[in-house]
Image (tube, rainbow, N blue to C red):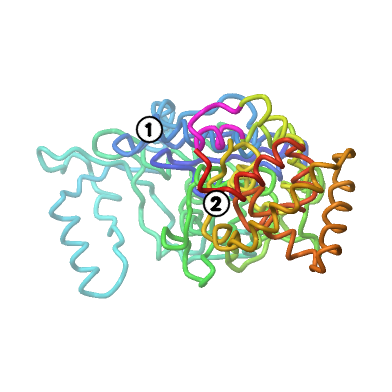
Amino acid sequence: MTVVTRFAPSPTGFLHIGGARTALFNWLYARHFDGRFVLRIEDTDRARSTDDAVAKILDGLEWLGLDWDGDAVSQFERRDRHAAAAQRLLDEGKAYLCYATPEELAAMREQARAEGRPLRYDGRWRDRDPAEAPPGVDPVVRLKAPRTGQTRIEDAVQGTVTVENAELDDMVLLRSDGTPTYMLSVVVDDIDMGITHAIRGDDHLTNAFRQTQLYDALGAKPPVFAHIPLIHGPDGAKLSKRHGALGIEAYRDMGYLPEALRNYLLRLGWSHGDDEVISTDQAIAWFDLDAVGKSPARIDFAKLENLNGHYIREADDQRLMALIVPRLEQDLGHPLDGTASDRLRAGLSGLKQRAKTIVELSDNAAFYARSRPLVMNEKAQALLNEQARDLLAKLNGPLGQIEDWSEAGIEAAVRAFAEANDLKLGKVAQPLRAALTGSTTSPGIFEVAAVLGKSETLGRIDDAVRPGEVG
């Protein structure tokens, strides 16, 4: 048997972080078993489905690196196939026309509310002759669901789950305007697409009972269901806007790398011993449903940032340049010239050791790209008092005499200067850092000076020493 999984989002908005994890689990399971991962856009809700949402879903999946097999399928375009399946059930006596009026349905709803029970259609047209239909009422098509016994699901995550059939009513397959319902469309599509495993959020578990009945009516074997717990916020409540970003594009904009987010989502509800950093190849080799937990996973942004920092440190410098240069150019308001690009490239290995997001990396790299004179932040301004400026003015002499302008040569000169003036190294290094970066934090200051070059370093020190004379 070839494993076939699917991701079936509704295109009513962005690709939700929970949906992305569902897609990842389906993708990994299919790739683990050398199967197929298919994408189906469940766009039957025409009022809420938009082309923009479809584009965002496809873009989000592509950015995450979750490639699907074949073309994405539009569920709406298969509506005739869904309607034909409903007609077949009518012809076989497994479904029936229901002429219950809106008023009758409203009365059922009110009675259920008064009795404190869920609304269930009472089956009044189940065995009734359509010839008795009231005039002017377009019927819906309902499934003749079993009324006795149980419907059982052997769920790959939740275990054995059962429901009394008396708790389920005859669900609608076709609406009065002839359009198929979600339940019918999903089952027919899963059958036609050969889906072997339906891996999805456990909020679909109640749907699985009705869908199992529909599979039985259509004479098809249900897929293996695997209902995974939802993602909760740090406080244990269902993930919502108040917890932060929900859409994949927001995580990209915040500076997370796709491989870091993949790794993080993998560990939300799935485990492999104590392993935290798991490459994509390892994930494909290891992933199976028996390691999916039954409890909701809590999102932890600090853990995501730490993981992202790891992947930034491992990332190729050329790739990181391609990610941060557009951000820098937008902030600076102009393209980077060759000198700034060269500095940035030379300093990137030191910068990426400390950054946890691409945004942070870009912000921290800005001092390499900025032109003189630098704009100092408040802490740097406070540090560069008159005493510090006097110190830097004295330091410029020894720095200007360095012939070996390298990290080691600069460090040796600064240390010698500090010792000659009976100062701790930090008393010299901190004002120097402020002068060269406009900040009080940066990579090693001797590394920074080496990357900036001798002329730029001396010029920035001079700007800091004589701030009133600049410009």
Percent of width and height locating residue 292: 68, 60
427 on left or right of 296? right
Q: Crowding near pointer 1: few (<14 within 10 Å), some, many (20+)?
A: some
Percent of width and height locating residue 424: 80, 68
Residue 307 among magenta residues: no
Percent of width and height locating residue 122: 27, 59
Tag in front: 2 or 1:
2
Looking at the image, which is closer to me, 110 or 67? 67
Q: Quarter of the image holding residue 392?
A: bottom right
413 on left or right of 334? right
Q: Name the residue under label 2.
A: 376
Q: Which amino acid does label 1 sit on?
A: Gln
Disc nearer the start of the sequence (2/1): 1
Q: Residue 265 carries which label?
A: none
Q: What residue type is labelled 2?
A: Met
Looking at the image, which is closer to me, 332 or 167? 332
| Rendered residue at 61%/33% (across/down) | 325
